[in-house]
Amino acid sequence: MADAHIVSEQIYDQLVSHTNGKAPAMRSWTGETWGPGNADTTIVLRHPGSLRATLFPPSDLTAGEAYVYDDIDIEGELFGLLSWAAQIDALRSSPRAVGNLVRLLRHLPNESRRREATRPEGQGRRHSLRRDSDAVRYHYDTGNDFFSLFLDPQMVYSCAYFLDEHEQLESAQQRKLDLICRKLQLQPGQRLLDVGCGWGALARHAAANYGVEVVGITLSPEQASEARLRNHIDGLRDQVSIRVQDYRDVTGEFDAISSVGMFEHVGESMLETYFNKLHRLLTPGGVLLNHAITTRSRAGRFERRKPSFVNTYVFPDGELLPIEASLRVAEDVGFEGRDIESLRMNYALTLRHWVRNLEGNYKKAVESANETTYRIWRMYMAGSVTAFELAALSVYQVIYTKRSTPWSFGRRWATAANDTS
């Protein structure tokens, strides 16, 4: 077998020659470093088979696992590295470049620190009540203490609403909560259902500032416990009820429904069930706000379900759909989309804050969870920054009403109160 050190350097040179922008440096397990001396990031190869473990077979799951299980380490700034690495996928359009790279990789030892048995696998029918509950608990059982290390003090786990890229995360999250309430046109005495309520920030904001009664539902007992504690501290126990409950089991009528950051768990096969259920729960004249991440990919269901790093280690059974998929089904069941807003770059900026917070709390994160969990979340959130900035992903807030709802002219929630023009 050829010398792994020489081959690894040749692979590095190949990657740099096919990409643009500032390349990272790469340090061999021998201590030798290749690439620019002023690089913002250094990829550290832990053993002679590191690059094969990272690049073969080519997928974000392979590369992510190589970092998580320490086949490679990443020193320095992560965002630029991932933007640079996103170009490597374009090599697939060049059979010659792919062939040369594969031949070199096969000269490296087939060794990896990845452990296939650690990959979580769902049990039972996909998107059954039990399996969805297990998937959500897998994600949130990481622990309230862990999430508190990178979220804002209210623990809002969805994208903030920035008016200035230099704005603090906390103020941008507060603006987002209030924007949702205004989009829902909440009035005192109304009932709000918050689907996927998280740690209850939106429920508390709506109750305290708009005088509504709120039912918040989550599948995570840890979230529910923390949300109830915060309700008690804020004196909102009589206005806000937090339940561990699936949306399919909710009964009653609500004047407004918010679903923020939960839709990604629903699944394409359950879209009609989801929108039908919310349509039945919403009173005549009521308003639904659906806030969801979308994908630009128009691949079929099979392609979207291929194992990826995120749906293996972060959101089991999570599915991202093109925006038109949800719009079509929602309108088929009787909703009308009356407002749509993209928050794509807001999410990229939110995630940058979260990654910096997590990295700044590295020791506490490892103590709260472990090194593997820290690496999973650092890679997931930094990778998501790249996806949003490159427009591979977006996030939309869509306002739905029943078609019979009287028309409301103008975006009253976005217009200054004294605007009479």
Image (spheres, rainbow, N blue to C red):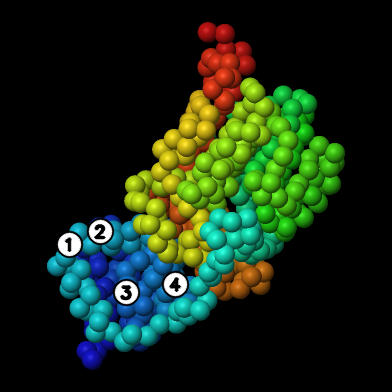
Residue sitting at 64 percent across and 26 percent down? 286
Inter-mark Cα distance, 3 to 1 = 17 Å
Note whether 159 is above or below 283 in the view shown: below
Is 129 on the left-hand or right-hand side of 340?
right
* Secondary-structure class at tag 2: helix
**Residue designated by label 1:** 94
Closer to the chain start, of discs 2 and 4, is 4
Label 2 Cα crowd, 10 Å radius (few <14 / some 14-19 / many 20+): few
> Which dot marks residue 307?
none
Closer to the chain start, of discs 3 and 1, is 3
**Residue designated by label 2:** 90
Residue 87 is at least partly visible in this image:
yes
Inter-mark Cα distance, 1 to 2 = 8 Å
Inter-mark Cα distance, 4 to 3 = 11 Å
Residue sitting at 49 percent across and 28 percent down? 337
Q: Indicate the amino acid at tag 1.
A: Ser
Residue sitting at 44 percent across and 72 percent down? 65
**Residue designated by label 4:** 65
* Secondary-structure class at tag 4: helix
> Which dot marks residue 56?
3
